[in-house]
Amino acid sequence: MATPTVPDAFGIASSWRVPGLGLLVLPAAPEPAWLAAPALHSEVALRLHRPAAPPLLLVATVEEIAYAGQPAARALLLDADLGKLPAIGSWLELLTNMPEYLH
């Protein structure tokens, strides 16, 4: 499943479980332009698309991570327990309006 040409959609480069917090996701290059705009820790609504699974609405916060000697990169901390890491070919889509039940 390739990332579609949907505005504000991006593939997942890598992800890690952060115990007690959720799933940290790094976007595949090129990083989506919108990810630089929100303040750190801002909530965003997303739709997770996974191969052979229905789309999943969820909330994430905008975070930054940095490896030694590397510039900081924006990431998303998904507030969800998916049971396993997203499969290869999974992608995320920014929702412009957060559904009320996700607040």
Image: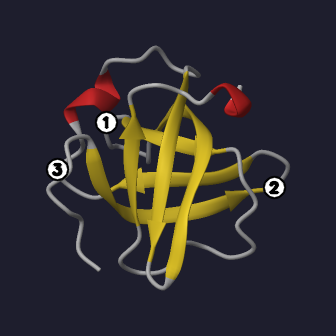
Above or below, comparing residue 62 to residue 32 in the picture: above
Q: Nearer the N terminus, badge 3 or badge 2?
A: 2
> Which corner quadrant holds the C terminus?
top right
Q: Is residue 14 above or below residue 100?
A: below
Q: Nearer the viewer, mark 1 or mark 3?
A: 3
Front residue of 52 and 25: 52
Label 1: element kind? loop
Amino acid carrying mark 2 in the image: Pro
- Circle 3 is placed at which residue position? 30
- The residue type indicated by label 1 comes to Pro
Mark-to-mark CA distance, 3 and 2? 28 Å
Q: Residue at x 14, y 56 (%)?
A: 5
Q: Residue furthest bottom?
A: 52
Q: Position of residue 8 (x, y in %)?
A: 26, 40
CB atoms at circles 2 and 1 under 8 Å apart?
Answer: no
Q: Position of residue 65 (x, y in %)?
A: 48, 40
Marks 3,2: beta carbons within 8 A: no
The residue to which callout 1 is attached is: 71
* Residue found at x 60% / y 62%: 16
What is the spatial separation of the Cα atoms under label 1 and label 3, in whole angstroms?
Answer: 15 Å
**Can you identify the residue that label 2 sits on?**
19
